[in-house]
Image (cartoon, grey):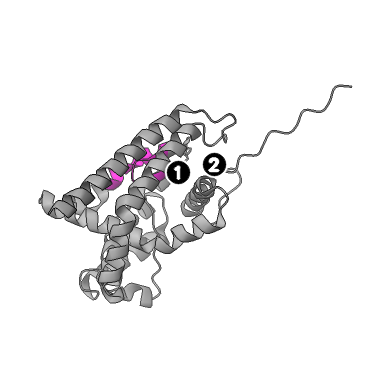
């Protein structure tokens, strides 16, 4: 019992220390922030805090989850939450007028919920019904709402002002949020968080090893992924752009 309390106390102290360091780092101002990221000082400090939380809590739990549960079980958990996501993707694909993608999402839910035993199995993929993930933030982007500044959220990580504004709608649209039991809802939310983190264990190692500045690497990757998601990998030039060009140098006076 004493060992457990000491461990928990160590985790709490680590998180409080990380939060203090994040606040202190946020006091510093980045001299020339990326035009897409005017709040870079805050975002970098929040990223440091999130990394500390991940190191102290999320990564150890996700690693234990991977070590304890066999791969078929973890695959079933991922399929279950993917099936719930397909239901919300159907709504957003329909709102965006992507009829084919909406039909794919609809039939994925029908097939995986029935033949796939509540979504634990994924026969829809075997039937070449591809998953087309969409959320309300991407729907707003497709409707022409600009992304706004880059924003790193506590625990949730990379986002933008637009995508953050869409989160309450996404929460309402998630079937887990419809459950009456608060305990069950919280347990499923925690399980989804751990399962998602477990799937990213390899990716975080790659980022740490390959990127000179992991923060910029993640930020640029987020922008590119969201743009491709909104426009299905083929964004028109006239639409929103995340890759703002640097201003042309002023020619010397004659």
Name the mark on residue 240: 2
Secondary element type, mark 1:
helix
Circles 2 and 1, Cβ within 8 Å, touching? The answer is yes
Span colored in magenta: 152-171
The numbered mark, 2 or 1, whose residue comes first in the sequence reads 1
The residue under label 1 is: 141
Asked if one can make out residue 195 in the rendered structure from this viewpoint, the answer is no
Quarter where residue 107 is shown = bottom left
Q: Which residue of the protein is positioned furthest toward the front in this rendering?
A: 2
Q: Residues within 10 Å of mark 2 (few under 14, many from 20)?
A: some
Q: Which residue of the protein is positioned furthest toward the right in this rendering?
A: 254
Residue 175 x %, y %: 22, 54
Secondary element type, mark 2:
loop
Say if the magenta span includes residue 159: yes
Q: Nearer the viewer, residue 4 or 129?
A: 4
In this rendering, the answer to whether 100 lies above or below 112 is above
Quarter where residue 109 is shown = bottom left
Residue 10 x %, y %: 26, 46
Looking at the image, which residue is at 52% across and 36% down?
Answer: 37
Looking at the image, which residue is at 31% across and 58% down?
Answer: 60
Is residue 22 left or right of 62 when viewed as pictured? Answer: right
């Amino acid at each position: 019992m004493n060992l457990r309390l000491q461990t928990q106390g160590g985790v709490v102290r680590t998180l409080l220390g990380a939060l203090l360091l994040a606040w202190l780092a946020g006091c510093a101002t980045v001299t020339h922030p990326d035009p897409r990221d005017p709040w870079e000082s805050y975002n970098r400090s929040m990223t440091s805090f999130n990394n500390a939380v991940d190191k102290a809590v999320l990564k150890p739990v996700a690693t234990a989850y991977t070590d304890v549960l066999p791969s078929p079980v973890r695959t079933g958990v991922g399929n279950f939450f993917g099936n719930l996501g397909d239901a919300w993707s159907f709504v957003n694909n329909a709102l965006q007028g992507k009829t084919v993608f909406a039909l794919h999402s609809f039939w994925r839910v029908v097939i995986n919920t029935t033949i796939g035993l509540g979504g634990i199995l994924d026969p829809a993929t075997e039937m070449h019904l591809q998953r087309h993930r969409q959320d309300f933030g991407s729907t707003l982007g497709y409707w022409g709402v600009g992304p706004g500044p880059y924003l790193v959220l506590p625990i949730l990580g990379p986002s933008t002002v637009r995508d953050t504004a869409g989160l309450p709608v996404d929460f309402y649209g998630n079937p887990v949020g419809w459950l009456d039991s608060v305990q069950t809802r919280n347990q499923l939310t925690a399980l989804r968080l751990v399962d998602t983190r477990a799937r990213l264990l390899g990716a975080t190692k790659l980022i740490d090893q390959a990127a000179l500045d992991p923060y910029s690497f993640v930020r640029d990757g987020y922008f590119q992924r969201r743009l491709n998601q909104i426009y299905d990998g083929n964004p028109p030039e006239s639409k929103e752009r995340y890759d703002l060009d640097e201003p042309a140098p002023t020619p010397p006076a004659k």
